[in-house]
Each structure stands twice: as C-alpha cells, then as structure tokens.
Image (tube, rainbow, N blue to C red):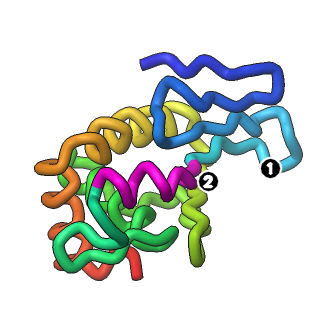
Amino acid sequence: MTPTFDSEGIDRTTFAPFVLHDCRDTEYKDTRLEFSDWEWLHDFCEGDYIEDYYLNGPGVEGLVMATRQLNGLEADPDSMDPNSEGDACYIHFSNFEEAVQTAELCAAMIKDKNLLRQAAATAEENGFGD
C-alpha cells in the first residue's frame, strides 16, 4: 500500500482506522503511526476488551508489536519508538518503509476479529501492551 498524505502530511484513509503522519521534514525526521478511533474499536469488539486483553493506548501498541512478530518482524526494533499511554497509541518510526509496512499489517489485523484475537493472545504471552 502507498500512503496518500494530505497537505499536513497525514494519511487518515489508507490504513484506517490507523493514521500515518509523515514527519520526515520536521526536526524529528520520523513517521508516526497513530490509533485513536476508540469508538470504532469498542463497537467492533463490543467493549473495551478482546477476550481478556484491554484495548487502550498501550493495549493497541501491544497489538502492533504482536502483529509485527506474527508476521516475522522484530516486535520492537531500534527503528521503532513506542510512545503510548492512556487512550493514546502513538508509535514513532525512524524508517519510513518500516512504518508503512507496520501500518499495512495492523490495518488488516484490527479489522479481522480472528487476527485481532491472535494478536491479543500474542501480546499477552509476550508482555506487550498494558
């Protein structure tokens, strides 16, 4: 998938419900993956949990890490800086291609309850998230 950034460097559609921010032209020179569509997620999962896994900012961050691992990638590489708390899931990437690949994998995972459950189980097993 190829991101389509608006004039502010934000792609809200390609990887929805995840959002990708192109900040490569800022002082931080990174790409950021955000999740903040809590109403959609809680409606999709019929609550704040998938199985026994809590769906808040760090919880979704854990799903991202688990999804990477389930797809043969390092869960938390040096090029990734997880920065989530409360109801904010925000992950910084120093490598643009890695951010795009992660966004693509996670967009597919979060819209498929079987993949979501698998990611939640993997996150719990590995201590990712909360």
**Residue that appears at 11% across and 50% down:** 114
The one nearer the camera, 75 or 34, is: 34
Q: Residues within 10 Å of mark 2 (few under 14, many from 20)?
A: many
The one nearer the camera, 76 or 86, is: 86
Q: Locate residue 102, reporting x and y percent.
A: 41, 42
In the image: residue 52, left or right of residue 68: left
Instruction: For the residues labelled 2 and 1, say whether their Cβ atoms are less than 8 Å apart.
Output: yes
Amino acid type, callout 1:
Tyr
Q: Quadrant of residue 116?
A: bottom left
Image quadrant holding the C terminus, namely bottom left
**Residue that appears at 46% across and 32% down:** 15
Instruction: Kindly identify which residue carries mark 2.
Output: 92
What is the spatial separation of the Cα atoms under label 2 and label 1, in whole angstroms? 9 Å
The mark that comes first in sequence, 2 or 1, is: 1
Dot 2: element: strand
Q: Residues within 10 Å of mark 1 (few under 14, many from 20)?
A: few
State whether residue 64 appears in this view: no
- What's the magenta region? 34-44
State whether residue 121 appears in this view: yes
Amino acid type, callout 2:
His
Query: Which residue is outermost to the right?
Result: 27
Q: Locate residue 30, reporting x and y percent.
A: 69, 44
In the image: residue 105, left or right of residue 76: left
Instruction: Kindly identify which residue carries mark 1.
Output: 28
Q: Is residue 54 above or below residue 91?
A: below
**Residue that appears at 60% across and 58% down:** 90
